[in-house]
Image (cartoon, helix red, strand yellow):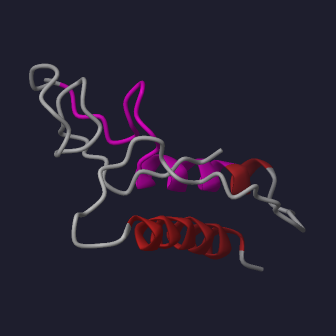
């Protein structure tokens, strides 16, 4: 499961996944561009994983996804319906798959 979090911030504190999370800890002195334990996957991690898949299995004919690509604890914008935001995240994930594995 990809569990894409488009709101992840590499500069967030060590106990946060997005800049909007409540301050559960102090600012981390380590930048984490590929994610943090307990956070859903940022775009950098997904792109890196897809590049590695291409490297080790370059002749893929079909990719089957179960649709479980949404992050678990996402802070959604108040001005946009939750269903639309879910759709946008799933669409972004599928576009990344399409671009990464297009023949």
Residue at image location 40% in from the left, 64% down from the top:
82
The answer to which image quadrant residue 59 occupies is: bottom right
Provide residue 86's location: percent of width, then percent of height. Answer: 48, 64
Q: Is residue 88 above or below residue 46?
A: below
Looking at the image, which residue is at 78% across and 80% down?
A: 103
Residue 34: x and y in percent read 40, 40
Q: Is residue 76 left or right of residue 100?
A: left
Magenta stretch, residue numbers? 30-52
Q: Position of residue 14 (x, y in %)?
A: 23, 24
- Residue drawn 47% across the image and 44% down it: 41
Q: Is residue 99 above or below residue 78?
A: below
Q: Between residues 36 and 44, which one lies in front from this camera angle?
A: 36
Relative to 102, is 96 above or below?
A: above
Quadrant in the picture for residue 10: top left
In the shown orientation, is residue 19 left or right of residue 33? left
22 displayed left or right of 10: left
Residue lying at 86% horizontally and 63% vertically, measured from the top left: 60
- In depth, the one of 57 and 79 nearer the eye is 79
Magenta region includes residue 49: yes
Image quarter of the N terminus: top right
């Amino acid at each position: 499961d990809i569990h894409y979090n488009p709101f992840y911030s590499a500069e967030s504190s060590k106990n946060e996944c997005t800049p909007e999370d409540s301050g559960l800890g102090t600012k981390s002195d380590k930048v984490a561009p590929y994610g943090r334990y307990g956070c859903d996957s940022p775009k950098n991690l997904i792109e890196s994983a897809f590049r590695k898949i291409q490297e080790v299995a370059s002749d893929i004919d079909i990719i089957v996804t179960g649709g479980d690509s949404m992050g678990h604890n996402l802070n959604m914008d108040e001005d946009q319906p939750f269903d639309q935001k879910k759709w946008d995240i799933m669409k972004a994930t599928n576009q990344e798959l399409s671009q990464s594995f297009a023949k």
